[in-house]
Image: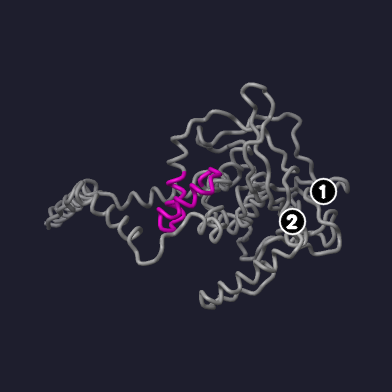
Amino acid sequence: MGYVSARGGLDAIRAAERLVRRLRLTSESSWLEEDQILEKLRLLVDRVMGEAGLWAPRLAAKALRQSEGDATEAVHLLRAYRSTLPRFAYSEPADADDVSVERRIVPAFQRVPGSQLLGRSVDYTARFLERQSDDLAREEAEKLRSEASGTPDDERSEAHADGDTPQRSPQRLLEMLREMDLVVDRRRADDPEPFDITRTPARPPAARSALLSSMTRADTGALVNQWYRNILGPDGYLHEVTLGEVRHGAIDVEVRHPVTGLPVCVSSVRVTEVEAIEDLEGVDEDRTKFDVGYGLCFGHNERKAIAMANLDIACHRDAGRTQLEQSLLLTTDALDSAGFLEHLKLPHYVTFRSMIERKFAMRKARNRDAS
């Protein structure tokens, strides 16, 4: 039996790259503009920025176009680009209470201070595939655009579920629970420096900031899978899960001015924030109270933030007894897992040749022993 590696070298690699560019750039359809990706695929852009750890909408749109819609490849392109950028400043700590809320739902309570603010969501509609022609879609777009032009801004931007006046920074449900003495207070008196996962890999046991940062950059699907595995008991029944609050909005990013030393707003980013309520029922836990997990990520990505919040409290309750924290830190990053998978397509002929030779040697030894 012979074993010969594939040949072609640098010329074959360049030809493969030309094929990719040819199909992307010379198709019969019109060129896909950045604004089209930003406006029509906004949730995908948000997901790529979150997993890349870089808030740069136009760069994310470029990466998605270059990767032909492959989200993991787009994340790889953004992280590679970010690694070339100088780090010239650190942002000031931002208070999540300063988020200008565009969407806020509280599944745990019917009426809460500040109102339920539905915002943009398909949670309350049936899933029907829209099959109208492009011409009908354009007509509907023009109709909606004309209707919006005659609607007051407040009415157009709000979709609240009750008669209360919507607030841009409403009181949190968590504060209400604290006033009722129903929540275990895990707040710290000190303010530890956040763990920087871009410079030091997070390994268990890790600080809470390292775990939250890792989940913020984790692959959304992988994180949701970890959450689902965690709440699915050995008996096949789902454990009770309650969401306290889901928020989406914009928050300012400030840095210190190098001359005046005063904080200066340099950007505004959109974030999704979730607080998840956990019913304490352990033998060594205070069963008269709840505990709360926290999740926050770039853009509008409620799936990731919900999974984060529930896994945050799950890791705290687990306290290292299982491999949950290790699994979250080491297996949910899209580039780590996909990178290992992708490298299998690279030449492995030397390794495989040695495996073949071992098989031949074992076969020869077995035949010798049999004779």
Q: Nearer the viewer, residue 40 or 301?
A: 40
Binning the other alpha carbons within 10 Å of mark 2 as few (below 14), some (14 to 19) or many (20 upward) gives many
Residue type at mark 2 is: Arg
The part of the image, by quadrant, that contains residue 151 is bottom right
**N-term mark: 1 or 2:** 2
Quarter of the image for the C terminus: give it. bottom left
Q: Where is residue 305? Give x, y as percent.
A: 64, 52
The residue depicted at 50 percent of the width and 45 percent of the height is 52
Q: Identify the colour scheme used.
A: one colour
Which dot marks residue 326? none
Q: Main secondary structure of the magenta part?
A: helix
Residue topped by disc 1: 171
- Give the SS element for disc 1: loop
- Residue furthest to the top in view is 259
Q: Which residue reaches farthest right?
A: 180
User: In this view of the protein, which residue sits in the foreground, 222 or 363?
Assistant: 222
Camera-nearest residue between 166 and 241: 166
Mark 1 burial class by Cα count in 10 Å: few <14, some 14-19, many 20+: some
- Identify which residue is drawn at 35% across, 67% down: 28
Image location of residue 84, percent across then percent down: 43, 35
Instruction: Give residue 79's position: percent from left, percent from top.
Output: 46, 42
Q: Would residue 302 be found to the left or right of residue 242 on screen?
A: left
- Looking at the figure, which quarter contains the N terminus? bottom left
- Depth check: 152 or 127 in front? 152
Question: Is 291 contained in the magenta span?
Answer: no
State whether residue 206 is above or below residue 139.
above
Residue 69 within the magenta-colored segment of the rendering = yes
Looking at the picture, how far across and down is residue 352, in whole percent? 23, 50
Specify the segment rendered in magenta.
52-78
The residue beneath circle 2 is 104
For badge 1, the amino acid type reads Gln
